[in-house]
């Protein structure tokens, strides 16, 4: 489990094909502190397991499934990446619940820079948009962000200078491919509603629940 608060910008320093996947070696410093082989680190929002460590880098294995369902398959040496270690039980929860299970990819449609930050529009497919709500949370390249508004082709975000300075979002431009993970709450709500519908009837409190979800913009 992660929070979407990026700890460090790392760099892809090695890429090697290995069986049915890729070994990525990532140059880093902060996220190496306390990390052991077998620990999880989020790389641009994808949860991967550390397979080896050195003083200045760590290596992870990305399977073919991860390669094709995220942006990792397009990475090359020198690419900067967002890094976050799995949340410690005693840690401060600054973002939202992020699993590191990328739901799909999107593309940056536009970037409008201002003195106070940047308004970014992200184009995404229906499999992503169905779970996104205005003022809700979404993880883009592993960064916990608040949705400003919904659009026919996707959604918009506002990035403050701090986020731009500490994450790969500073490199976002039209056409840039990003990993997207929707808020897990939305998926659980959908699952519960589906189960209720299949049950062939509604419970007395279903209408109350649906009204609250509608008031909150979830349905």
Image (spheres, grey):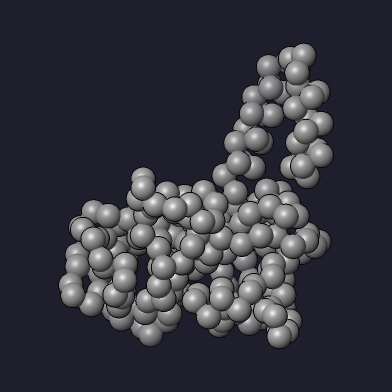
| Percent x, y of residue 61 | 30, 62
> Quadrant of the rendered structure where residue 203 is?
top right
The one nearer the camera, 216 or 201, is: 216
| Percent x, y of residue 120 | 69, 73
Can the viewer see residue 140 in this picture?
yes
| Percent x, y of residue 74 | 46, 74
Point out the image quarter for the C terminus: top right
The one nearer the camera, 138 or 18, is: 138
> Quadrant of the rendered structure where residue 206 is?
top right
Left or right of 186, for residue 53: left
The one nearer the camera, 75 or 114, is: 114
Q: Residue drawn at (25%, 66%), measured in percent from left and top?
A: 33
Q: Residue drawn at (78%, 59%), measured in percent from left and top?
A: 150
**Image mark count:** 0
Can the viewer see residue 179 in this picture?
no
| Percent x, y of residue 174 | 67, 81
Q: Residue drawn at (68%, 17%), measured in percent from left and top?
A: 199
Q: Is residue 30 above or below residue 51?
A: below
Q: Residue drawn at (61%, 62%), measured in percent from left and top?
A: 145
Q: Is residue 55 above or below residue 206?
A: below
């Amino acid at each position: 489990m992660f929070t979407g608060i990026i700890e460090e910008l790392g760099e892809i320093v090695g890429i090697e094909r290995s069986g049915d996947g890729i070994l990525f070696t990532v140059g880093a410093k902060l996220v190496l502190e306390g990390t052991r082989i077998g620990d999880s680190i989020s790389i641009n929002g994808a949860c991967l397991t550390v397979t080896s460590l050195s003083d200045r880098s760590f290596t992870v294995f990305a399977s073919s499934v991860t390669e094709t369902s995220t942006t990792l398959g397009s990475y090359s040496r020198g690419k900067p990446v967002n890094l976050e270690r799995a949340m410690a039980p005693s840690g401060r929860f600054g973002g939202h619940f992020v699993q590191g299970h990328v739901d799909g990819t999107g593309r940056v449609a536009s970037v409008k820079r201002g003195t106070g930050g940047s308004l970014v529009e992200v184009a995404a497919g229906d499999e992503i948009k169905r779970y996104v709500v205005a003022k809700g949370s979404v993880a883009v390249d592993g960064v916990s962000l608040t949705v400003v508004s919904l659009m026919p082709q996707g959604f918009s975000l506002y990035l403050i200078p701090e986020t731009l300075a500490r994450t790969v979002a500073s490199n976002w431009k039209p056409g840039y491919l990003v990993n997207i993970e929707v808020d897990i709450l939305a998926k659980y709500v959908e699952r519960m509603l589906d189960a209720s519908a299949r049950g062939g009837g509604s419970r007395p409190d279903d209408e109350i629940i649906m009204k609250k979800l509608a008031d909150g913009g979830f349905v």
